[in-house]
Image: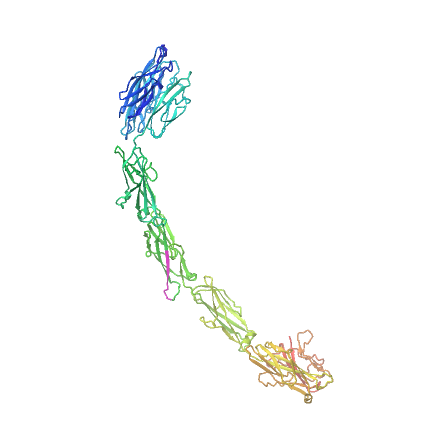
Amino acid sequence: IDPNNGANEILAVDDINDTFINLPVSGDVSTNDLNADGPAGTEVFTLVSGPANGTVVFNADGTYTYTPNLDFVGTDTFEYQICDGGNPIACDTAIVTIEVINVTIGNEPPVANNDTNITLVDVPVNGNVLVNDFDPDGDPIIVTANTNPTNGSVVVNPDGTYTYTPNAGFVGVDTFEYTICDNGTPALCDTAIVTIYIINSNTNITVANDDAYNGEINTVISGNVLDNDNDPEGDNQTVDIAISPISGPSNGTVVLNADGTFDYTPGTDFIGTDQFVYEIFDDGSPVATDRATVYLVIQKTPAPAIAIVKTGIVNDENQDGCANVDETISYTFTVTNEGNVPLSSISVTDPLLEAPNPVVPIILVSGDDNGDGILQETETWTYEADYALTQIDIDAGQVINQATVEGTDPDSTVVTDLSDDDSVFEDDPTVTEVCQNPVIALIKTGIVNDTNGNGCADVDETIDYSFAVHNLGNVTLNNVMITDPLVTVVGGPITLLPGEVNNTAFTAEYVITQVDIDNGSVENQATVTAEDPAGNTVSDLSDNDSVLEDDPTITVLCQNPAIALIKVGIPTDENDNGCPDIGETIVYNFSVKNTGNVMLSNVTITDPIVAVVGGPIVLAPEEEDTTTFTAIYTITQADVDAGFVENQAIVEGTEPDGNVVSDLSDDNSYLEDDPTIIDVCQNVSIALEKTGQFNDENGNFSSDVGETISYEFAITNTGVVTLYDIYITDPLPGIEITGDPIAQLEPGEVDTVTFTATYVITQEDIDNGEVVNQATVFAEDIFGNIVQDDSDDPTDLTNNDNNGDGDPDDPTVVTLPLVLPTTFEIFNGVTPNGDGFNDFFLVEGISNYPVNNMKIFNRWGVLVYETDGYGGSNDSENVFRGISEGRVTVEQNKELPTGTYFYILTFPKENPGQESYNGYLYINR
């Protein structure tokens, strides 16, 4: 085309199209032809020559339908002519090249479609020959060679890009050929022709070249229609999406963008050809437009493929929560047809289920819906088989393997697949985890060896320990060993199979100590360790009787806590009278012995009658202590009353477990519990003194009938024991005794107030000149024995002991008094404390009778004082002040104790009315 020559010009550009074997294809040759000078819309298309290998129906608007001959595969062409309505009429011809392809299994050659491009004179043009080429297999393709054009030069790159440079001033059509190859084995190739139209035009143009794309059924085809379009002036090209696609597609949908990118989605399951027409414009001045057709081939490439997914589930038949030997793995084999052709002769094999392992059939359980033995593209076949676990599997912790599936396509091609565990796209082996439960248990028992046969554990006797090791898990355990912090364990290492028990491999012996016996037991735990098949350590603390617990083994040692006490008393006899007396002491010595087999701490002795000095102490078994504990006891009146001191001490010690052991003392043996008895001398006696006083009621200083005598009684406990229920009787007719029995009278105690008596004087008494009689006192000791005494008149120094009890028993004589002209009175109370009152024995009026003799006796009749001229010149000189004057049995100048004493006062010459007076006096300090 050379608009400068002034003639009407038109350009017919070669076209391409692609179809499958036996599949018609349609097209439109007008979209890429160029009628730059018009008149537009007057173009008429006619068929020049038909195709050699098919038929074509060609329409005047440039549309056509080509039908290849039956089973023809290859390249076919036909020629057409375009004429416009200009003056003169301009016409041109072009070739339509049809590629008829057959999609087969295996490597197919790529399809190279012819290319066209347009440029201006002296203007290089760029393009890409691979944009409309494809490989039915989807293999990558590259340009491997090309020829040189006649009227220019070209550089073609392996990626399909090229730059064609026309010769200077050349106007016309130029061509070059290129070759593409895939990367299959072997590599397959195809050739195509690139036609370059060089025009000389001063009108702005832009060129849209036809495109060809190949895709698979139900698969989106993406591309860019501008990749092989060209603008000779270098203007920017844009797809006019306001009107594009101008026509088509008929069997799918397209999303076309202004930058030339598009996504074509074929109709569901559509196989065949489709096309759409688009229009571009540039940014030149004026704006140029052009149209081109995108030819689409959607194929279903025979692609036989098969996949198998193998899954395994461990069956816990015994419901123990873990795998065991001979429990099974249920394998499920899911076989799917991953290709697009049916498959026959399906077989599933698995080396795990074949010899030398037990042979297990793999059974088809579902999926072959019509039962024709053909695995259709939409079918999923399921096979099942059970595998019995071995100990090796459990020790490994997993079962790893792969199955293989095979199938045959319609072309007798065998396809296979190794199983995957969860995906049809991978071939990972199926790993079925097998529960491993490494568990070990230890039972430790101990038996005491009673070497001496005494029925109890002793120091240096032994305990024999035995160990039963149990493999409670489901894996083999190796390097089984036992350690024990208490003893050295002999034996091992050993190996234990699941369920195995070994009770002979390990032993230990322990020597008993005193600490153990004190504890009452030997308590400890051993530890068993082992390695599972993975080398991990499993362990257990021993139990005494169960594999399910971890209690320490407690070997009970016979404890015999025992203690014994001997208490010995030694009287001190401070007064050397050969007998323990009240106020004297008993020294107690204690011997305590640990007669058991455990240590005793906090050993103490208590005694209900005395405070024990010493302790606490600790005693080892068989240890004896004779020096720590002592006690001093002071004899009491109650002891004297009883006649002995009898009691038992208690020894207590604390066992190691805190319990207290005790023993009552014995007097001479650790084997008995008799009380310790110390005899105390007893002297049970009582004394009664009776004094009478004439009552001169009428004041005539003479006794008269009817007048009375008042009697007083002094009762003295002269023994060393307490007396009870004391009363007095008196045989004197008519005497009236008043006073209730005395409940208790301590030794040495004198009662002068409880009992009194009154006697009415008779004429007989007056005739006799006196009243003579005796009373009798009665009492009981603590044991109910009766003691009695006849009364004594303390004024009578005759001191007759009629009953032989050592006390005088003189009857009381009351002389009926003569009236005396002078005052004479004897006072019988002495309190020698220096207070000026009663400090001496006062005899009032005795100074009137200076010739006198005074004797004073204690109650046992011992003379403790004697003097002549008692009272001196004023009644207070040379008097008795409670001080002994010294005699055989009484130390001189010794203060006499509180008590009753007796006096005898005689007047050898002149007297106050009587030659002799006697009576008692009482010293109170």
* Quadrant in the picture for residue 728: bottom right
The quarter in which the N terminus is drawn is top left
Observer-nearest residue: 525 or 574? 525
Q: Residue furthest bottom?
A: 767
- Dominant SS type (magenta): strand
Image coords of residue 160 (percent x, y): 33, 23
Instruction: Based on the picture, tell me whether residue 452 belongs to the magenta stretch.
Output: yes
Residue 24 relative to residue 712: left or right: left
The foreground one among 73 and 114 is 73
Q: Quadrant of residue 145?
A: top left
How many numbered marks does the figure carry? 0
Q: Residue 536 placed where, x, y %?
A: 36, 48
Query: In the image, which residues are magenta?
Result: 443-453
Residue 19 pos. (x, y %) = 31, 25
Residue 263 in picture, x, y percent from top left: 38, 27
Q: Is residue 819 above or below residue 437?
A: below
Rendering colour mode: rainbow
